[in-house]
Image (cartoon, helix red, strand yellow):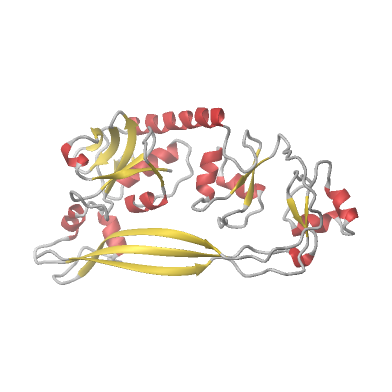
């Protein structure tokens, strides 16, 4: 009798330090303001204002909140709760690694990595992890309200050369950079970020673009840029048709399913990490109406929704391109009996 054990572990990580003061004072920039004027009004210096607010230049924009005093410098506090769902398999007599990997639709490299195996030796009764699925929830902690120096309202004006974006729950620098057609490096430089950590509600400068404050790219430009990126992705993918399957492969000499997606998106200009199918599924944004360029995911068994074993790139018209373990890179239909019964859903990078 086959045994599958599913375990769920939860870890809470304090993602930023508690640092808030009831004596904090801030100022909301009004039309016509500049750093020198604000510094003189509040009896401080331009250099101190730039240091307190991590400003790389003298550029500020209307409605921007500036820290005026040392006591006002605060760090948002939030807790990230990570849940990992793990499925295990008990080795039986006659089993070997590649057989188990194929059974669960994972690569040999993933199986060895998850179980910290240096070789191919396994024994009956040994428990092996055969899938890992996780999700992350960000909980925003209450913050002390800091009184503002000036409560006057003004008409929202944003210089044409600067656009901003407010971080939403589930966002990452990589996702924001791709959405805004900028690089992660430029995004970090523009916002003086020392790491990839961002938090919900944070205002990020996007740079010279058509972005409106706190919004994504304007509809017409977003559509045009998205279409160009999708064309590059599909073009790169079709160049690899016929390349043979190779476990853990991520080059034209051989691909596995996730390695194929990684190679295609990277060569299409995306900043993307080499991850497993299940991790791409966890990181992606769920879509109900798939479009060309979206990712499509499958399970190893009919009716199963808990294990991600295969993925590909959706081409439209119910077609997708993928690295098949039997025939290499090829185009298939989602309506084929095998895939139709194992379809889990679509995600967008």
Would you say 280 lies left or right of 192 here?
A: left
Would you say 184 lies left or right of 258 here?
A: right
Residue 250 visible (yes or no): no
Would you say 40 lies left or right of 278 here?
A: right
Query: Residue 217's spot in the image, x, y percent?
Result: 57, 35
Residue 158 visible (yes or no): yes
Give the answer, above or below, for where 84 lies relative to 211. Answer: below
Give the answer, above or below, for where 335 lies relative to 166. Answer: above
- Looking at the image, which is closer to me, 16 or 186? 16
- Looking at the image, which is closer to me, 184 or 216? 216
How many badges with numbers are in the image? 0
Residue at 30% x, 28% y is 317
Toward the front, the furthest residue is 152
Would you say 332 lies left or right of 199 here?
A: left
Query: Residue 290's spot in the image, x, y percent?
Result: 36, 36
Q: In which quarter of the image is the C terminus?
A: top left
Asked where in the image residue 306 lies, by quadrant, the reply is bottom left
Give the answer, above or below, for where 78 lies relative to 107. Answer: below
Query: Residue 105's spot in the image, x, y percent?
Result: 22, 51
Toward the bottom, the furthest residue is 125
Q: In which quarter of the image is the N terminus?
A: bottom left
Query: Residue 66's spot in the image, x, y percent?
Result: 76, 54
Residue at 11% x, 66% y is 92
């Amino acid at each position: 009798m086959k045994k599958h054990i599913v375990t769920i572990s939860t870890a809470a990580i304090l993602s930023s330090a508690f640092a808030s003061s009831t004596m904090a004072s801030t100022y909301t920039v009004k039309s016509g303001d500049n750093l020198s004027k604000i510094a003189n009004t509040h009896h401080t210096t331009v250099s101190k204002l730039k240091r307190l607010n991590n400003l790389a230049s003298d550029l500020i924009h209307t409605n921007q909140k500036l820290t005026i005093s040392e006591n006002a410098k605060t760090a948002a506090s939030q807790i990230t709760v990570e849940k990992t769902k793990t499925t295990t398999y008990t080795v039986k007599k006659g089993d070997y690694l590649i057989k188990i990997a194929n059974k669960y639709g994972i690569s040999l490299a993933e199986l060895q990595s998850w179980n910290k195996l240096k070789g191919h030796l396994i024994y009956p009764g040994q428990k092996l992890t055969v899938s890992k699925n996780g999700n992350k929830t960000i909980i925003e902690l209450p913050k002390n309200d800091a009184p503002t120096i000036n409560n006057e309202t003004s008409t929202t004006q944003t210089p044409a050369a600067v656009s901003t974006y407010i971080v939403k729950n589930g966002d990452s620098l990589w996702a924001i950079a791709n959405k805004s057609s900028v690089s992660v490096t430029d995004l970090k430089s523009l916002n003086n970020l020392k790491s990839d950590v961002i938090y919900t509600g944070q205002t990020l400068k996007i740079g010279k673009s058509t972005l409106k404050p706190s919004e994504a790219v304007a509809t017409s430009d977003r559509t045009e840029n998205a279409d160009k990126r999708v064309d590059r992705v599909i073009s790169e993918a079709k160049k690899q048709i016929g390349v043979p399957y190779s476990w853990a492969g991520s080059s034209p000499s051989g691909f596995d399913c996730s390695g194929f997606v990684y190679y295609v998106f990277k060569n299409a200009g995306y900043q993307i990490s080499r991850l497993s199918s299940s991790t791409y599924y966890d990181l992606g944004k769920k879509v109900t109406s798939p479009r060309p360029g979206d990712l499509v995911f499958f399970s190893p068994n009919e009716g199963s929704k808990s294990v991600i074993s295969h993925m590909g790139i959706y081409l439209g018209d119910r077609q997708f391109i993928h690295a098949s373990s039997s025939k290499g890179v090829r185009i298939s239909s989602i309506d084929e009996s095998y895939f139709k019964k194992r379809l889990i859903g679509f995600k967008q990078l």
